[in-house]
Amino acid sequence: PKGAPVGVLKKTPKKHFLSAENITESKEFLILDIQKKLRLKDDTPQFSYQQEYKISNFEHRLMSEIEFRLERTPVEESDDEVQHDDIPTGKCIAPIFEKKLKNFK
């Protein structure tokens, strides 16, 4: 049988004891590598045609008007922010109508 060529020595691999830091670094590296491979695998060519839409003057004015009115419209307060009057308990006076309604059926 043939031996190793002259001039090349066989080295026995030394066992390295990894520290906790090296282990976490290697785990993070493996995770990043796997994520990268999965991203490349998931990046299948997708046909997306982007069209540039042309907007007419009327549509542009309409959009501007809508934006303007949305900015002017007051925002309604939520029910939590509104303070409600307390409902009185006990004896209450019925409302009195001074004018009678006409043509009420």
Image (cartoon, rainbow, N blue to C red):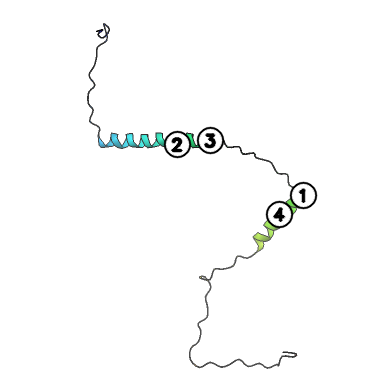
* Lower sequence index among marks 4 and 2: 2
- Kindly check if marks 4 and 2 are in contact, taking CB atoms under 8 A apart as contact: no
Disc 4 marks which residue?
64
Q: Neighbour class for label 3 at 10 Å: few (<14), some, many (≥20)? A: few
Residue 19 drawn at (x, y percent): 25, 34
Q: Amino acid at mark 3?
A: Thr
Q: Neighbour class for label 4 at 10 Å: few (<14), some, many (≥20)? A: few
Viewer-proximal residue among 72 and 100: 100
* Lower sequence index among marks 1 and 3: 3
Disc 2 marks which residue?
38
Quadrant location, the N terminus: top left
Label placed on residue 24: none
Left or right? Give the position of 63 relative to 2.
right
* Lower sequence index among marks 3 and 4: 3
Q: Give the quarter of the image for residue 20.
A: top left
As helix, strand or loop, the secondary structure at mark 1 comes to helix
Q: CA distance from mark 3 to mark 2?
A: 11 Å
Q: CA distance from mark 4 to mark 1?
A: 11 Å
Disc 1 marks which residue?
57
As helix, strand or loop, the secondary structure at mark 4 comes to helix
Residue 58 drawn at (x, y percent): 77, 52
Check the image and report above or below for 55 versus 82: above
Disc 3 marks which residue?
44
Which residue is rendered at x = 22% and y = 30% of the image? 17
